[in-house]
């Protein structure tokens, strides 16, 4: 065999080996990212006693949109599991609550979206929920909204939201403290502008009014801040959380992750590491399909609102849905 033939053969074997290693690495990465995700079979747990899915009646003269409308319950959990979550403020290992709750409505065709925040201090009627260990919880009146998660986990959180809104949740997504902080860091931080000084010893955040580029720990502290702004209620914190959502969408849009596979993997690893979903979104393929349907959705097309509330007559530190405004908002998302 001549020198040129041997060189070509070596080059071919090297390329083949690199391809095998690349395919193997890609396969491992895919398995790892999918394995990161925790899933809950909410549909099976809740059965048919739920708000109906909207009936699709497209106009014969109009083409059907490429994607149907979706409602997704997104929770930020103050999970106490794991050393990192405890370090970031999750407390001891005695449980978790829904620290943040947003209903994300994606329009058919993905031309726009509406993010509705539900104050965690809202008093609601919590329906009877199946317990993970068997049996059911009792109906609870004038219960704080975020207690639903503490009592019955994701299943009870979804059932309570559906009872309060009359809107069926197509999917469920939950991210814990650690996952959120890692996501922000993987994106290179996030830039936000505050209108007032923030001094909150509870969240360990101290910022002067102005524009700041925050790392993951600081962004998480901003999302949790309530005592250092406004009247110290959950409503002030919701405004900061909605600002963070918009800033993160803009940060993601500004980065062409598909041209940087290493960064794309870091972001995907961060997203999935602290993620819990329903069984309809519990694989990388399903999350990718959802993400691809949002590729043309800009931050400017995302509307952020808060469920209309008023002070609760029974407790000035709590709120209740303001009617009929709240009902009209939820009807617009069905």
Image (tube, rainbow, N blue to C red):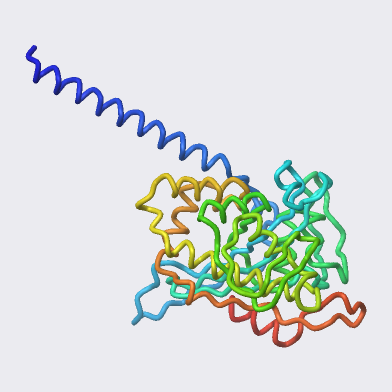
| Residue 56 x %, y % | 48, 73
| Residue 257 x %, y % | 40, 54
Tell me if residue 310 comes above or below residue 296 in the rendering.
Answer: below
Could you say which is closer to the camera, residue 170 or residue 223?
223
Could you say which is closer to the camera, residue 214 or residue 244?
214
Q: Quadrant of the N terminus?
A: top left
Q: Residue furthest front?
A: 208
Q: Is residue 207 visible?
A: yes
Q: Residue furthest top?
A: 1
Q: Within the image, what quadrant is residue 50 found in?
A: bottom right
Count of labels shown?
Answer: 0
Residue 243 falls left or right of residue 108? right
Q: Residue furthest left?
A: 2
Q: Is residue 166 visible?
A: no
Q: Quadrant of the C terminus?
A: bottom right
Tell me if residue 79 comes above or below residue 212 in the rendering.
Answer: above
Q: Residue at image x 71%, y 67%? A: 161
Could you say which is closer to the camera, residue 263 or residue 13?
263
Q: Residue furthest bottom?
A: 324
Q: Residue at image x 37%, y 53%? A: 258
| Residue 24 x %, y % | 39, 31
Q: Residue at image x 35%, y 75%? A: 63
| Residue 179 x %, y % | 62, 50
Q: Residue at image x 87%, y 59%? A: 138
Residue 280 falls left or right of residue 204? left
């Amino acid at each position: 065999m001549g020198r040129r033939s041997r060189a070509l053969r070596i080059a071919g074997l090297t390329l083949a080996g690199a391809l095998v290693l690349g395919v193997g690495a890609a396969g491992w990465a895919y398995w790892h990212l999918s394995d990161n995700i925790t899933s809950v079979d909410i549909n099976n747990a809740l059965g048919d006693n739920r708000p109906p899915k909207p009936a699709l009646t497209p106009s014969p003269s109009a083409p059907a949109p490429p994607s149907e409308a979706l409602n997704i319950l997104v929770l930020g959990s103050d999970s106490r599991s794991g050393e990192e979550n405890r370090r970031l403020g999750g407390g001891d290992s005695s449980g978790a609550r829904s620290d943040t709750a947003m209903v994300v409505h994606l329009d058919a065709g993905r031309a726009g979206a509406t993010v509705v925040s539900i104050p965690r201090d809202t008093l609601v009627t919590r329906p009877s929920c199946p317990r993970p260990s068997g049996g059911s919880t009792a109906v609870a009146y004038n219960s704080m909204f975020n207690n639903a998660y503490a009592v019955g986990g994701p299943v009870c959180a979804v059932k309570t939201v559906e009872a309060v809104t009359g809107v069926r949740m197509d999917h469920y997504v939950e991210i814990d403290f650690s996952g959120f902080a890692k996501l922000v860091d993987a994106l290179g931080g996030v830039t936000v502008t505050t209108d007032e000084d923030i001094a909150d010893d509870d969240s360990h955040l101290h910022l002067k009014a102005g524009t700041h580029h925050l790392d993951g720990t600081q962004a998480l502290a901003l999302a949790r801040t309530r005592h250092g702004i406004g009247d110290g209620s959950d409503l002030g914190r919701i405004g900061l959380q909605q600002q963070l959502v918009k800033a993160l969408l803009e940060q993601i849009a500004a980065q062409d992750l598909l041209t940087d596979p290493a960064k794309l993997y870091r972001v995907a690893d961060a997203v999935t590491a602290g993620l819990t979903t329903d069984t309809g979104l519990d694989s990388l393929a399903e999350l990718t399909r959802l993400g691809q349907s949002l590729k043309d959705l800009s931050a400017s097309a995302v509307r952020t609102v808060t469920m209309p509330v008023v002070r609760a007559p029974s407790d000035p530190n709590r709120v209740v849905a303001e009617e009929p405004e709240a009902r009209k908002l939820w009807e617009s998302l069905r």
